Amino acid sequence: MQALNFPPQNWQLSLKNLITDPKELFAILDLPKELLPAAERASTLFDLRVPREFVALMRKGDPKDPLLAQVLPLEQEFEERSGFIEDPLNEAASRPTAGVVHKYKDRVLLILSGACAINCRYCFRRHFPYSDNQISGTAREQALTYIRSNSDIKEVILSGGDPLVASDTRLEQLINDLAAIPHIERLRVHTRLPVVIPSRITDRLLEILGKTRLQTALVLHINHSREISTELERACQQMRQAGVTLLNQAVILRNVNDQAAIQVELSRSLYRIGILPYYLFLFDPVKGASHFDIEESDAKTLAAQMQSELPGYLMPRLAKEIPNRPSKTLILPDIQ
Ligand SMILES: *Cc1c(COP(=O)(O)O)cnc(C)c1O
Ligand code: SF4
């Protein structure tokens, strides 16, 4: 596990100070110059955006580094492949009001912020119309009204973008408003921010999550054990002390984590820092990212290999999202 060697600092400064220029990324990591023109072209499709803390975990001079591969814009993003589309999950069909995605009966997603600290090239939200779907002002009130008037909803999932881009003050107000709705029992936060900027877990945030009456879970997004820094470990320890359940969801990505040994190490490393593996998603067929895709049959073989090496509780559920179903679709490992 690597230490970041960053002084403890203000996460908002880290967010302002992201690397967005491919030239700078190439200089810091000492990457082969011949890859730069393609990176510049592809960053016009989806901006390069990566925190310095995350770049500090990458290997220098290695264009195939599994952390770098998640953020480096590539020529292949211009390739069109049939079935790879802009809204593969058909979320547009499940938005009762701006910023709310209600697909599953007892829980809703609230899109708290359109932005992320990092732009993952494979993200199914790379084409998402964020500007129309952030909750603030009247949209926030309409979202709360929708949740208040639907007593089937037991859980609110803060999502995005990355919901932890929002300030602690804004989060506290929203969590208070949600906790005031009697039928809401659970709060979930889907975030990658603590992974890429661990200082996001502020004392204030710990206090807010620790004191709400809602049962709270944080679902992190870590795809490779090398994303786990000592700073993230400390943040996870503090969150557990605050009573927050920690889970992880990952996505299978070609040449990043599509080997059983990498997945097994990921599950073990997560558990070492108090996180249980939750989902391992098959890739969503998003336009511009088909080079990350693997065959479903290969994913099932991968899962079977993992299952033969891991205790049941460290085996993530292999799943995919098929639009218009009442839950995620679980896929069984292909055990020979
Ligand atoms: C994935 C997802 C959820 C959460 O599903 P779980 O199986 O409970 O983790 C909720 N709402 C939407 C719209 C989702 O896409
Ligand atoms: S939503 Fe998650 S996967 Fe997508 S860019 Fe943001 S952090 Fe990455």
Image (tube, rainbow, N blue to C red):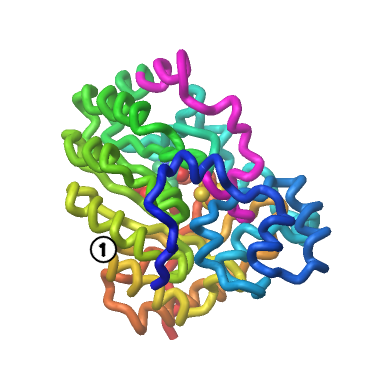
Q: Main secondary structure of the magenta part?
A: loop
Vertical placement of residue 228 versus 17, above or below:
below
The image quadrant that residue 268 belongs to is bottom left
Residue 138, position in %: x, y? 46, 13
Q: Residue at the spot x=36%, y=78% of the render?
A: 307
Segment colored magenta: 117-144
Name the image quarter holding the N terminus. bottom left
Q: Residue 135 in magenta?
A: yes
**From the viewer's perspective, is 112 left or right of 202?**
right
Which residue is at the front of the view, 125 or 1? 1
**Relative vertical location of residue 274 with respect to residue 1 in this rendering, above or below:** above
**Quadrant of the rendered image holding ligand 1:** top left
The residue sitting at 70% across, 53% down in the picture is 84
Q: Nearer the viewer, residue 196 or 260?
A: 196
Task: Work out which quarter of the rendered image holds the C terminus and state it.
Answer: bottom left
Residue 14 visible to the viewer: yes
Report the residue at 62% width, 38% height from top: 128
> What residue is shown with label 1?
274
- Taking 24 as reference, is 311 above or below it? below
Q: Position of residue 60 (x, y in %)?
A: 61, 72
307 sits left or right of 73 in the view: left
Instruction: Classify residue 218 as left or right of residue 131.
Output: left
Q: Residue at x 54, y 28 (%)?
A: 133
**Quadrant in which residue 121 is drawn:** bottom right
The disc labelled 1 sits on which kind of residue? Gly
Is 217 magenta? The answer is no
The furthest residue to the bottom: 336
Q: Position of residue 65 (x, y in %)?
A: 60, 72
Residue 115 percent across, percent down from the top left: 54, 38
